[in-house]
Image (cartoon, rainbow, N blue to C red):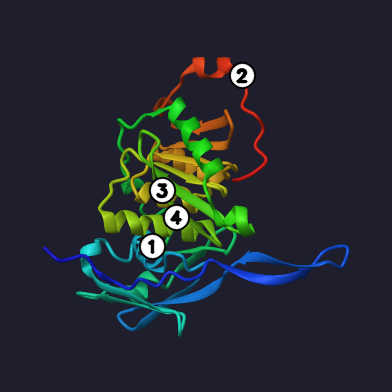
Amino acid sequence: MKTRPLLSNAAAELTHDVEVLDERGRLSTIAIPAERPLTVYVDKRELVTLMTLGGAPEALTLGYLRNQRLVRSIDDIASVQVDWSVNAVAVNTYSGIADIEERTSKKVVTTGCGQGSVFGGLMDEVDSIVLSPDARLKQSVLYKIVDMIRTQDSIYKQAGSVHGCALFAADGKLLYFIEDVGRHNAVDAIAGRMWLDDISGKDKVFYSTGRLTSEMVIKGGQMGIPFLLSRSGTTQMGHMVAERLGMSLLARCTGKHFLLLTGKERLLFEPQLLETGSRNAETVGY
């Protein structure tokens, strides 16, 4: 059995201080999110440049390769080394990536902040994804997750202008929380962490602050996750793919409000939770 890849530990500063003038001409200093390019090289071949905060560059790189279906197993990767002096990450594999030129020749530019992209046909592998048919989510756990996100310490609270994604266990325990300039980067970084920690998505819950587009739904499916939550909405194609996968898509999740669009049989309703009245309106957080 091959060992896990050798990783650098190259997390970068997540914010940058700048001086600003307000409407009264007063000078102050604020924090803004960092943004830097990270060019991915696989076996010395330039693949793509990702714009990122840089908080989890190794996990981002692994998750990108995983979700692009370029590498099937983490055991195929020998090392992932980030060098911010040249804004690059070098990935070395044991046996190379078969037909990499052909597999990366077709690119689909996806919707969303930071403008994501996927190689190959967007729907090529959807029909091969099988989600656990037994996975269920309690309404009380859903509320626990939404409340935890609201109170989570984040770059968003400090500096704004970023998206956050999180992975939760079936009981609502927070496993990972990652922010980046684009939601596709954040989901890729979580996919990389899951790979490194050998965590299955079969009963997990994924939360995103951004829209649940087809790209997000497909990536969630590739990670084996049956529940996708968002404080925002979804798109027609995101809805269509979720229905095709049998995935539960929950949008507009704030306080005790949510909209369950697909996979309705997976949610275990608990009507008594609503008898206590509405939550107070949140004014801080995601």
Q: Amino acid at mark 1?
A: Gln
Q: Which residue is denoted by mark 3 in the rendering?
A: 220
Dot 3 and dot 4 residues touching (CB under 8 Å)? yes
Q: Amino acid at mark 3?
A: Gly
x%, y% of residue 145?
47, 37
Dot 1 and dot 2 residues touching (CB under 8 Å)? no
Q: Secondary structure at mark 2?
A: loop
In three-dimensional space, the C-alpha distance between marks 1 and 4, rounded to whole angstroms, equals 12 Å
The quarter in which the N terminus is drawn is: bottom left
| Residue 11 position by quadrant | bottom left
Q: Secondary structure at mark 4?
A: helix
Classify 10 Å Cα crowding around label 2: few (below 14), some (14-19), many (20 and above).
few
Q: Is residue 98 visible?
A: no
In three-dimensional space, the C-alpha distance between marks 3 and 2, rounded to whole angstroms, equals 33 Å
Q: Is residue 282 left or right of residue 215?
A: right
Q: Which residue is denoted by mark 4 in the rendering?
A: 187
Discs 4/2, front: 2
Q: Which residue is denoted by mark 2 in the rendering?
A: 277
Discs 1/4, front: 4
Residue depicted at 54% across the width and 53% down the height? 154
x%, y% of residue 259?
56, 31
Classify 10 Å Cα crowding around label 3: few (below 14), some (14-19), many (20 and above).
many
